[in-house]
Image: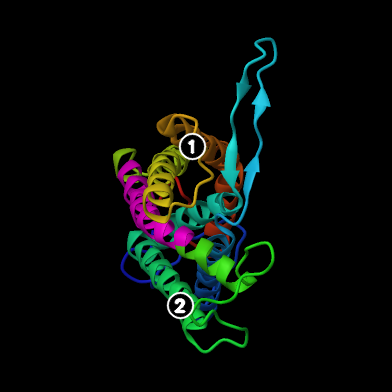
């Protein structure tokens, strides 16, 4: 809707709503953009720290069949669908260019998180170090101090998420606008769900493969077939994201129409 500039000179007329001056329009539009971009970046930082610090076993038994379905997701997956909802709102209200800008800022944030973790691990510690290895002394249970445990897991999560993140988020923005052009701005539900579900499949595959083959951070059982376990992780993560993406259709519809009125933009079906 606002492809070249966040503040077009003309405002859409809504019956019963007063016209707004340029300063008020600018304040409203930049304020809404700040909310969505801040929620996106804050969620991204949180999930990269929490990431793979814990895996949730939500396996269940199919009624009437008695077969157990493995359903294991990392705790970092829980808030992840919010990031796709935010980029869909930004894409709908502000255009592909600003949505892509937020995605790139997310990459910078990932690098910043890794930089702080690296710096924290490199500076002189206030705890004893093993003179032979230079590593912090482990406790009686063989564990590193909490920071180093978090750093190890976060580095694995961030390395995996950076690859998956770029692939999935740019896929989300591209597919969203592909469907928007193809349907000539009709069928809001299609570009919302179509872009999110395709991009989250890309994300689910990439993050599991990178987490295992690069970070070696998945709880893989050595006596079971590797690809069966990786497939279960991918299917579990995608199933969770698929359900979340389906549920966000209603708030996306309601939010798009309400925000278009609030920001004096053309309705989603008429933009």
* Quadrant of the drawing holding the N terminus: bottom left
Q: Specify whether 182 is left or right of 129.
A: left
Q: Secondary structure at mark 1?
A: loop
Residue at 52% in and 37% down: 221
Residue 222: numbered disc:
1
Q: Which residues are magenta?
A: 156-179
Q: Is residue 25 above or below residue 264?
A: below
Foreground of the two, 124 or 87? 124
| Percent of width and height locating residue 22 | 48, 79
Q: Position of residue 13 (x, y in %)?
A: 50, 60
Q: Is residue 35 visible?
A: no
Q: Name the residue: 61% across, 70% down.
A: 138
C-beta proximity under 8 Å, tags 1 and 2: no
Which residue was labeled with disc 2? Answer: 118
Count of numbered tags:
2
- Dot 1 or dot 2: first in sequence order is 2
As rendered, which of 5 and 88 lies closer to the eye?
A: 88
Magenta residues, dominant SS class? helix
């Amino acid at each position: 809707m606002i492809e070249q500039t966040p503040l077009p000179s003309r405002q859409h007329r809504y019956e019963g709503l007063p016209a707004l001056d340029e300063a008020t329009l600018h304040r409203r539009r930049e304020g809404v953009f700040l909310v969505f971009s801040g929620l996106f970046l804050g969620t991204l930082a949180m999930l990269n720290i929490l990431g793979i610090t814990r895996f949730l076993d939500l396996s269940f038994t199919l009624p009437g069949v008695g077969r157990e379905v493995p359903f294991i997701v990392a705790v970092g997956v829980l808030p992840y669908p919010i990031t796709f909802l935010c980029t869909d709102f930004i894409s709908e209200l502000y255009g592909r260019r600003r949505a892509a800008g937020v995605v790139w800022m997310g990459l910078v944030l990932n690098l910043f998180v890794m930089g702080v973790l690296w710096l924290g691990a490199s500076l002189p510690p206030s705890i004893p170090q093993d003179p032979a290895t230079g590593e912090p002394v482990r406790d009686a249970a063989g564990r590193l101090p909490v920071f180093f445990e978090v750093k190890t897991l976060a580095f694995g999560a961030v390395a995996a998420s950076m690859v998956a993140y770029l692939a999935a988020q740019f896929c989300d923005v591209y597919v969203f606008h592909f469907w928007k052009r193809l349907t000539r701005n009709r069928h809001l539900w299609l570009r919302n769900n179509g872009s999110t579900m395709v991009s989250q499949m890309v994300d689910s595959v990439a993050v599991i493969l990178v987490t295992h083959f690069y970070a070696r951070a998945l709880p893989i059982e050595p006596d079971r077939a590797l690809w069966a376990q990786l497939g279960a992780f991918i299917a579990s993560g995608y199933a969770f994201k698929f359900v979340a993406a389906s549920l966000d259709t209603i708030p996306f519809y309601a939010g798009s129409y309400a925000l278009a009125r609030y920001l004096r933009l053309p309705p989603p079906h008429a933009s």
